[in-house]
Image (cartoon, grey):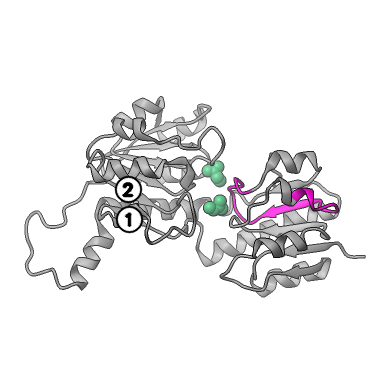
Amino acid sequence: MKPKVYLTRKLPDEIINQLSEKCELRMWSSEEEPVPRAVLEREIQEVDGLFCMLTEEIDRSLLENASNLKVVANMAVGYNNIDISAAKEKGVVVTNTPGVLTETTADLTFALLMATARRIPEASTYLRKGKWEAWSPMQLTGQDIHGSTLGIIGMGRIGEAVAKRARGFDMNILYHNRRRNQEAEDKLELQYAELDQLLKESDFVCVLTPLTAETKNLIGVKELRMMKKTGILINTARGGIVNEEALYHALKEEDIWAAGLDVFAEEPVSLQHPLLTLPNVVTLPHIGSASVTTRLKMAEVATENLLKVLDGEKPPHPVG
Ligand code: GLV
Ligand code: GLV
């Protein structure tokens, strides 16, 4: 008998075929729309494996309904959407997809940093709205990237990959992490800083840490006040790490200069969200890892994790 698996979103055929060969596969057949909670609650009762996205909240009550479940394979590096301790208590293995998305996410982080510093979306809109009547000396002036100081909060794989890009722009790089990363310090000429020092000295503050109980609202009123008036905050990690209300006020009152956000506390973000009313915020719909090649690789890694556990083996990327 093949193990039963539920897949929460339509994926490319090659992935579906690979899963169908080894499993009795059921799936939510929309590519765009997440599986409704009620459907997931029903489907999870029977299955041995769940292949899910970061849009699904895999909480205790859901896990308690899943008596055959052996594995939850999340198609993301972040796994704050899963209750890890509840999974552990139930003997359910949780896996993620690190490594394959590092460079792609670092590319996007740098793109967002540059777009925010040089006001690229605003400038593009300015032209298209017919506001460009003449070249003028101080028109749409932004902040320099080269030679500035970048503060990276969270020196994991993605942090290192962003630092590598920053070296090419002759940036001075500070970082803050739970543990010092001596290897990265040597290789990339990074300087370790306490969070306060990093916030005070950086021109760009880049959030690249996982969302956990310790990092929830890590950047709030006090932290934003420590930043320079010309400072720019970039978040491509998780919305919950930055207190959005505090950020709104800091931007509105010009305590900091701008923010570039790929992630929000609630996704998709509401068009009524106060942050979306500000001109000095560049917003993206959580596209950090969104290249064709990388999304396919993430699906492949999640598939491998899932099938290994169902085969009774250790998966390549267990978490928790
Ligand atoms: C995306 O945000 C991921 O965690 O992979
Ligand atoms: C994720 O891959 C990280 O360690 O930053």
Q: Where are the magenta residues, as a range?
A: 63-81
Picture coordinates of residue 124, whole percent (x, y):
24, 66
Quadrant in which the N terminus appears: bottom right
Q: Secondary structure at mark 2?
A: strand
Amino acid type, mark 2:
Ala
The kind of residue tagged 1 is: Val
Residue 38 is left or right of residue 34, and the answer is right
What label does residue 259 carry, if any? 2
Tell me if mark 1 has few (under 14), some (14-19) or many (20+) residues whose alpha carbon lies within 10 angstroms of its own. many
- Looking at the image, residue 149 lies above or below residue 305: above
The residue at the far right in this view is: 1
Examine the structure image and report whether residue 207 is included in the region drawn in magenta. no
- Residue displayed at 48% across by 37% down: 154
Q: Position of residue 24 (x, y in %)?
A: 83, 68
Q: Are marks 2 and 1 in contact (CB under 8 Å)?
A: yes
- Provide the major secondary structure of the magenta segment: loop
Please tell me how many numbered marks the rendered image carries: 2
Quadrant placement of the C terminus: top right
Q: Is residue 259 above or below residue 30?
A: above
Question: What residue sits 61% from the left and 61% below the top?
Answer: 297
**Which residue is painted at 19% across and 66% down in the image?**
126
Q: x, y (%) of residue 179?
A: 53, 27
Residue 214 visible here: yes
Q: Nearer the viewer, residue 157 or 69?
A: 69
Residue linked to disc 1 = 282
**Camera-nearest residue between 287 and 150:** 287
Circle 2 crowding by C-alpha within 10 Å: few under 14, some 14–19, many from 20: many
Dot 1: element: strand
